[in-house]
Image (cartoon, helix red, strand yellow):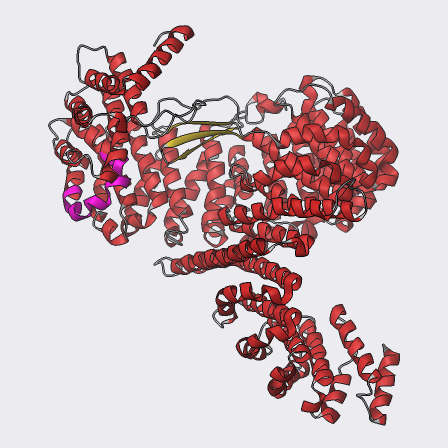
Amino acid sequence: MSASNADRAAAEAAFHRLRGSHPEPLALRLASSLAAPATPAELRAMAAVLLRKLLSPTASPDSSAAAPPPLWPLLSPDGQVALKAHLLAALQSDPPKPIAKKVCDAISELATLLLPENTWAELLPFLFRAASTPEAPNLQESALLIFARLADYIAESLLDHLMTIHNLLASALAHPTSPDVRIAALSAAVNLVQCLPTNADRDKMQDLLPAMMRALTDCLNSSQEASAQEALELLVELAGAEPRFLRRQIADVAGAMLQIAEAAQLEDGTRHLAVEFVITLAEARERAPGMMRRLPQFVGRLFQVLMQMLLDVEDDPAWHTAETEDEDAGEGNNYGVAQECLDRLAIAIGGNAVVPIASELLPQYLSAPEWQKHHAALITLAQIAEGCAKVMLKNLEQVVSMILNGFQHPHPRVRWAAINAIGQLSTDLGPDLQVQYHQKVLPALANAMDDFQNPRVQAHAASAILNFSENCTPEILTPYLDGIVSKLLVLLQNGKQMVQEGALTALASVADSSQDHFKKYYDAVMPYLKAILMNATDKSNRMLRAKSMECISLVGMAVGKDKFRDDAKQVMEVLMALQGTPMETDDPITSYMLQAWARLCKCLGQDFLPYMHVVMPPLLQSAQLKPDVTITSAESDDEIESDDDSIETITLGDKRIGIRTSVLEEKATACNMLCCYADELKEGFFPWIDQVAPTLVPLLKFYFHEEVRRAAVAAMPELLRSAKLAVEKGQAPGRDESYVKQLSDFIIPALVEALHKEPETEMCSSMLDSLNECMQLSGCLLDENQVRAISDEIKNVIIASATRKRDRSERTKAEDFDADEGELLKEENEQEEEVFDQVGECLGTLIKTFKASFLPFFDELSVYVTPMLGKDKTAEERRIAICIFDDIAEQCRESALKYYDTYVPFLLEASNDDNSDVRQAAVYGLGVCAEFGGLTFRPLVGEALSKLNNVIRHPEAQHADNIMAYDNAVSALGKICQFHRDGIDAAQVIPAWLGCLPIKDDKIEAKVVHDQLCSMVERYLLFSVSMAVTVEYFLHFI
């Protein structure tokens, strides 16, 4: 290609003109040149690339121009036949490999268009012949590569020929001379296995696995590690997508991979891929639950390999200088991989499998003379803590002792690792660690801050104070504040920026955790913080200045606006000046300032309103940032390269996507801050709603970053509340209820649509919660179509949740399913309960808002709600379903009587449920039915009394766990006395009810009961003198 931009631009323009005016001659000329030996190789390669782009059914993803029409339909029938023939002839001409691969790309691109329409009949026979010709290895390799790329399109058409393709692949995997053919066959086999529709079909390919593994080992034995790494990457893909395919031979396969991982003479990249294979198998929970836990010997070997990899660390002098950019100094390639994989392994297989192995290896490392082994042991503890938290908590004393011993080690890197472990465990094992060991941990961290010979150790100790205090109550922290704050102030004056930054972060966290108790230190601390804010103006001090903002704002929130007010004015003047200063895109001050402003708003409340005109423009600008995304073909030679660590690259299908995460993080921060302002300022936020709503509503479907979606979801009810309050309080000039309706019409349908497309279960719960709040605020402003859309989406949510639970239930039938997997499954199902809980809340709001007019919608939903009452459902599901009916009965009254035959038997049965929450909901419902059920409920009074009596007279009825059910049962009994006196033995039942009074724990029901009592007295329902005396006694008591 020409080095001249002008020449390239002119050539591209000419090419696009030809594409538009003469598509067929252009395509055929490009295709015919592929097999022309006289054409220079560089031009043939470029022709193949251009032809693939012409045949692609979609525009180039990085093109901003309108996509031209697809080229293939523009060709004449003869032209189409000729083009296909040219492409296949080009492969048969034995071109150099780089050209052959690009021709394969072009053939695959065209085949994806034609195979679904069955309009390239000659392709598959050609590929079968070519893939069966070991004497022409280049052609065989090309055919197998095309098979691999087209597996998704041809898998079903090959079902009747599986044994033929099986034999073809078996032969190619054992090619006597060409490792490239063996790797191409492995690629075809891996892709085909993934695309076959059933386990039975995949089982027919099972006996290829030894040959697939031999393709890998042959490469290693012949020192062809580049080919071996290709093979490993393919096998890792298989392990993630179809782990059960490996199950029958898992011992052999995992053993071979661990041999590779253990082979120190191999390249690091080869060993890392072998480790990745085993870790991927361990993580494949949904497809092969518990499989790797059945192989503890392999888990032990892998754990040992990873700990040995952690020894790849040297005592680099740059580490001791404590310059931020050298924080990884001395760490080799293996070190970072081992860290990440220990974390993933522990999370994947859990503490019951990992902790016994760690308990055996860690003491060996800690008793060794080499400092690297002590360092590795402490890093290991930190990395496995998240996945092993439950088991480690049972051995907390031993774990803490192990780590605190590291604080005394003579080598600073070991002391750093010990501090790191305490910091990590403070997060993963908190608050138990803080409650039980604060008296040991905090003094140890305070002493570590005195290590002036090793500023990196000091800085890390300050950071660990942050981790520890985040899970700490003021009561635990306060006795240590004098020592900690004084030491942090000393570090704040240290010459090393890393130490100062650590001290600022720790001070911020300590203030946040100790709240009012920090007032004592305010006058000593704030001058230092303001000095840094005002003086750290060099570019090298940007992060220091940013952290000073964070610290000042958190200290201000802790001590309150009365103490902070005067300093707040000075600080905000500095921030306003900074706000008007141009900043570089990577300046951390931007994000920190957004958060600092929001904290200042929380601290000052309505007093912050005068600053909103300064804060909002840049905040909106950050919230409106477009994601910085680069898309290329996964098969393309064009890599997405950047020295910027904030570029994250992922491969989706045939596309490689690069995303600048720093942009997304700034956007997420800004969206969170907008939500914060709306929440804090309420009606004061009204002037900004018309700009904020159009910014945030589209972000409900922003799938690049979950935190952006979460912030947008949380903001929806806050915007509605702000608008509603402003209108109600007369602070919205020229606006009335129609404005609230307009905003509601903008927000609620968007929330419903986003909920329909939301892929994350936890986010679904948040969206339902937000929708519920929005419905409560909108009330009767919702129209019938909106209620219909909401009801339909609630139905979809229930169906999707049931499907996920059914899929999980299938996992329990897996051969290797075990108790650990059952525990993880239980946690996932608890998320579904949260979804259903929010469904119940939404239905409750609709019922309370629209009462009987909602019943036609409820009738459609009841088929999904009623099954939740079944004994096969969880207690929480039964409770929520009962609560939904309770709302129907209470809000719809006479209109709800038609449901009594269906639901009241469930209430009666659930009144004596083992779960106290279910009992509470059921007896509450009986009370509602007694109040509003009239003659429909009358025949059930006797059974209801019996059930309520069981609840009230139970020996542990007034135990803390049962008291709410007891109070609601007493309330229900009172309603039967009040509304069904003629149907009971009043002389026996009413005194029994009076004997239960007063109730005190359920405040709402207590008021109801005592109102009942007063009403019954006023209506002379209690007529005996003895009862009147009893009533007088209780009224006096109350």
Please name whichever residue, 311 or 148, is drawn nearer the observer in this view of the structure.
148
Give, as a single range, the part of the protein colored magenta.
147-165
Tally of numbered tags? 0
- Residue 137 seen in this snapshot: yes
Name above or below for residue 306 compared with residue 11.
below
Question: Which of the 4 quarters of the picture holds residue 996?
Answer: bottom right
Q: In the picture, residue 466 is in which quadrant?
A: top right
With respect to residue 911, does 664 lie above or below? above
Residue 995 can be seen, yes or no: no
**Frontmost residue, 899 versus 220:** 899
Is residue 906 left or right of 525 when viewed as pictured? left
Nearer the observer, 797 or 446: 797
Residue 521: quadrant of the picture: top right
Taking 150 as reference, is 587 left or right? Answer: right
**Coordinates of residue 243 in the picture (x, y in percent):** 34, 47
Instruction: List x then y, in percent, for residue 746.
Output: 61, 44
Residue 33 image position (x, y, % from top left): 21, 15
